[in-house]
Image (cartoon, rainbow, N blue to C red):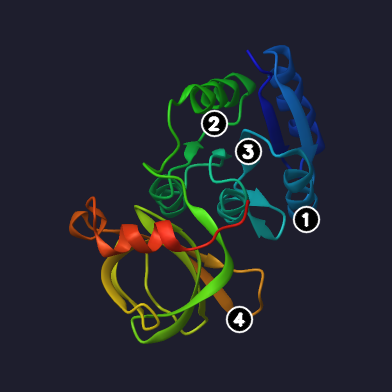
Amino acid sequence: MNETRLLLADAASDERFAYAAALRRAGHAVYTAATFAEAKATLLRTSPDVLVTQVRLADFNGIHLALWGRRQLPNLRCVLIGASDLPLEAEARASGFFYVRFNDEQTVLQATTEAIMRDRPRRHWRRKRLTSRLAAWIDDHAALVLEVGYGGFCAQLPATFEAKADTPVTLDIPGVPLRAQATCRWVTAADVSGAFWCGASLGDDEIRAGSRWRRLVDALPSEP
């Protein structure tokens, strides 16, 4: 069995050392990061199978790190560690992440093991990152579609976009043309100042075999 690569992000050095030691004793290759920026750089360098991160990373949010990481590595599993916080926990679980309320080593190890053993990632179909961004409109906001898959898409939108998780949105791609109904699953700040990323899923009618959406996904060029 191939060795599982883990990235552990924790601003507290004592916790970071303890978690890393426990995970290494379980036979995993563990990379560590103390800051949000260091975690992003390490993720790109090591391509881990699982991200384990504190929800609070100094002035940054571990959920945003997980969402960013999932854009870079579509099959990335994520475990978030945080005290009981219902809004944060709901946001994490809605995005398909593991959320643990207790920060003892055994709880973190168990959650990480469960993430590793999960047979399939959150999505039924893997997304493909487009070689050129696709101009679109989402609920009357100019958007750029960055990734597509049979089940949905990820797009970049302006700060005026106000959709929340689990709310309906309408996707218009004039150049095709195509109009589809979708559900916004998550929204997070993008690397581009004043912009947001939105992940959305399409309804069963839109993604059935032979649908226009599937044909579009198959036709669009993607990064290798």
Work out whether mark 4 precedes mark 1 in sequence or the reverse, and give the earlier one. Answer: 1
Measured as percent of width and height from the top left, residue 171 is found at 33, 74
Work out whether mark 3 precedes mark 1 in sequence or the reverse, and give the earlier one. Answer: 1
Measured as percent of width and height from the top left, residue 92 is found at 46, 48
Work out whether mark 2 precedes mark 4 in sequence or the reverse, and give the earlier one. Answer: 2
Amino acid identity at mark 4? Gly
- Viewer-proximal residue, 200 or 58? 200
Badge 3 element: strand
Crowdedness near tag 3: few (<14), some (14–19) or many (≥20) residues, C-alpha within 10 Å: many
- Viewer-proximal residue, 198 or 97? 198
Amino acid identity at mark 2? Phe
Crowdedness near tag 2: few (<14), some (14–19) or many (≥20) residues, C-alpha within 10 Å: few
Q: Are marks 2 and 1 in contact (CB under 8 Å)?
A: no
When asked about the image quadrant of residue 47, the answer is top right
Amino acid identity at mark 3? Leu
Kindly identify which residue carries mark 3: 51
Kindly identify which residue carries mark 1: 37
Kindly identify which residue carries mark 2: 102
Amino acid identity at mark 1? Ala
Badge 4 element: loop
How far separated are the C-alphas under marks 2 and 1? 25 Å
When asked about the image quadrant of residue 174, the answer is bottom left
